[in-house]
Every structure is written in structure tokens, then in C-alpha cells.
Image (cartoon, rainbow, N blue to C red):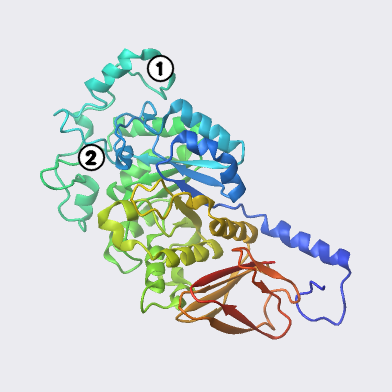
Amino acid sequence: MSFDRKPSRTTASPALLLCALAGASLLSGNARADAVLHAFNWRYADVEARAAQIQSAGYRAVLVAPAYKSEGSAWWARYQPQDYRVIHHPLGDTAAFKRMVSALRARNIDVYADVLMNHMANESAQRPDLNYPGTRILNLYAGNPTYYNSIRLFGTLSSNFLSALDFGEQRCIADYNDVWQVQNWRLCGGNGDVGLPDLKANSWVIGQQQEYLRQLKAIGVKGFRIDAAKHMPMSHLNSVLTADIKSGVYVFGEIITGGGAGSLEYDRFLQPYLQGTDHAAYDFPLHTSLRNAFGFGGSMSALVDPAAYGQALQGNRALTFTVTHDIPNNSGFRYALMDPVDETLAYAYIFGRNGGKPMVYSDNNESGDNRWVNAYNRSDIKGMIRFHNAVQGNDMQVLSHGSCHIIFRRGSLGIVGINKCGSTVNATVNMNNSVLWWYANYTDTLGSGSVVNIGSSNYTFSLPARSARMWLR
């Protein structure tokens, strides 16, 4: 079998062909694979125990539960910090966190920490003051000083580290389109809820948050997810996240929007964030593009290059996804859930395309949907990651597209085909000027057994109904 790119008047020797294949592999390996697993609400010990599986699946980073003092068994309790100075909650403590980081680092997998800097826990029902962590928690520390000092990150545990002077006014956001309110007032739940105490960007708060991030870095954390970044003034973000803290870490913010350029949320919140920082962000514009393209009446042609018209973030600033933890677990965001098949096809798109750092969400069925338990280890997801890792650093060219389908190549190494519709799509592509190799097998990494072998100027790709193919040479 020949591995020439197209018919030639001369035939290369097998040795030369093997060298060419090796060279192509080396070139594609220059870009580091970057698939991210969001181990949502996993115990640190469970992440540690699954380190070998995570590595085998091809992930290079794991986003883990927020690491500080918090209480309560509900998933949302992890997003209500009480104290930055220790890691202690139902999913693990500082010792468990360190063991997890060490286990993943040994397998060349980075840890991304979920970081809360906008607010502290709403404890108004327990006490009227804004001293954190408060007398009850300080008494816990004093009752077992050996243990709590062993898990201390910084500071002293004999006194509070925040007071009323460190919080903004007790006022709930009334208009979520008003930038001032969103970034300076409280997130409240209604029915008299006084909300999550909003932190001021004074010198003390900034210093405590910086020290906390430095301690996480010292443990080995390589990335920070900034929760509720939409609700923080740019001056606060940039004051905390100085060059030394950001050095060597991947910083990405959560700015939820319902669309890309031209939508109110994008124009008022996400675009200023991208212009005012050098951080990455969740690619909510692309997620909206995916939902629209896969939805009834949508066209897959919209996914040819959505970033070109502001409907996706530029690749080097984008954390791409098909579902985040907020979407199934918060009633206000469930409108953004995709059909399960469409979600799988969308995964094929984000792992196949060039640009963005793709993330897989895997939970413990907190929402009750039972869709994402062990999703990180699904055979199709692992096939997508295998394709993604193999083609890193290669260019992307769309070969064919229409209302139902899109087909694109990644360099000469891979081809992605997606058909959202209920009947087979056959798309014929002229191969005369393609860099794809002729007379070489491209085999589907998703396990269908489908093989593409181009042997003429026109090749017809056959995409079965409601399916994706990720053919790798």
C-alpha cells in the first residue's frame, strides 16, 4: 500500500515513507494537547484514585472543586467560602488536595482550581456580623489546633481574617443588565434573601486573595477558574491577578452570556473582560452558536468559522464546552441544555476543530439527569480526545458544509464529519488541491469502523444520520 498524498509518477521507498510519517507525527506533537476534565463535585481522593484512568483517556488538566473552608453537603455549598486559610469541606482537606495534585502531576496532568473571589458565604441566618470565618469556626479551630494548623495554608487561625470593612453595601442586584449593579451589589435568591456578601477590592482583601492564590501555586496548581468573574470589577481582577501570580498558570473566567458580539451580555460584560485582561474565558458565544446550529431550523454552515463574526472567542482565549455545571444544576440555565445526541455531536466539533481548550463535564448526578456520570471515561469521548491530541498544531480547512453537515480536515492527519439530521448525507469533495493523503487509511477514532481511503480526484464522504466521524490517519 502506498502512502503518497496523491498519484505520482514515482514511487517512494517504504523507508522514506516511514520517515515522512514520523516527521508528520513530530510536527503535530509540537503543540501540547490540552483536553480538560471538569471533575465536578468529585472528592479529591476520587480524583487521585482515578489519576491513571484520567491519564489513559488523554486529559492534560483537571478542574477540581473549590479549595478552601466551606460547609454543607450540597454542591452549591462549595461556592460559599468561609475561610481561604485552610482547605476543609466534605470533598477533602489540604492534605487530600496535596495528595491529589501530586498524583496528577506524576502523570503530567495539571490541576486547575475553582476560585471564588467575588463573595463569601451567606451566613446571615446564623449571625448578623460579617466577620469571617466567624466565632463558631474559630472555636472549631481552637478545639483541634493540631489538625487545623496541619492543613493551614497561611495566616493565623486564632482570629477572623475578614470584617465588615471588607464588604460592600447590603443591596441585591435588581437589574442584571446594569454593569454597576452586577459588579458591585449582591447575588440574592429572592424572598427576602440578603444575598452573598460582596467583597470590596480594598488592599487587605486583595492581599489575602493574592496570598491564597500563591499558596495554591506553591502546592502545584497550574490554573485558576475565576467563578462569577462577570460580577467583579476589572480593577479587582487585575489587582489580584498580578503578573507573578499568573506566571505559569492558565487563568479563565466565567462570564455567562446568551450570545456573541451584538448581544447585550457580550457587549457589556464579556467583551470588556477580554479587552481589560489577558485571561481566557468560557466560550459561551460558541456554545450559543452550537445550540443554534444543532437546533431546529439551524444550519451547520454557521460553524464554519463563528469566530470570524464574533460568535466564538479567538482560540487562544477560549475554554470550549458543551455543558457546564451551572446549566443542568441551576433552573435558570437549563434552557441551554442540548439534546443528548446533539451534545455528543457538539463534543466532536469542539474536539475536532482548531482553537480553544476543550473541556468535558463529568459529575455525580447532582442534577438528577443521569447524563454525565463517568462521562469523562466514555469510549466515544476518549476517541475524540485521541483525535484532538493527535492533530494538535495542524491547520483546519472546511471541506464541505450545509444545513445538515460539516466536514473539515486537520492538516493531513485527520478529517471530521458531523451530520445532525435524520438521514444520511453524502458529500463529494474535490481532492486535487487537498493536503490529505491518497491511498492512506483514515480510520474513525469513535469506533464505527468507518475508513476513508482517497483514491480519486473526487471523494464522497458518507455521514450516517445523527452521527459524527473523526477519521485519523
Q: Disc 1 or 2, which lies upstream in sequence?
A: 1
Q: Residue at x 18, y 47 (%)?
A: 189
Looking at numbered disc 2 in the image, what kind of residue is underneath it? Asp
Q: Which quadrant would the N terminus be assigned to in this image?
A: bottom right
Q: Give the structural element (helix, strand or loop) at label 2.
A: loop
Q: How crowded is mark 1: few (under 14 residues within 10 Å), some or many (20 or more)?
A: few
Horizontal arrangement in the rendering, residue 40 relative to residue 471 (left or right):
left
Q: Position of residue 260 (x, y in %)?
A: 35, 66
Query: Looking at the picture, does residue 215 appear above or below residue 323?
Result: above
Residues at badges 1 and 2 in contact (C-beta under 8 Å)? no
Q: Nearer the viewer, mark 1 or mark 2?
A: 1
**Above or below, comparing residue 80 to residue 33 in the picture:** above
Task: Find residue 196 and report its image quarter.
Answer: top left
The residue depicted at 45 percent of the width and 81 percent of the height is: 403
Q: Which residue is drawn at 42% across and 47% down?
A: 363
Q: Amino acid under label 1?
A: Tyr
Secondary structure type for disc 1: helix
Q: Quadrant of residue 309?
A: bottom left
Q: In this view, does 20 lie above or below 184?
A: below
Rounded to the nearest whole Å, what is the CA distance between mark 1 and mark 2? 30 Å
Mark 2 highlights which residue?
A: 198
Q: Name the residue under label 1.
A: 147
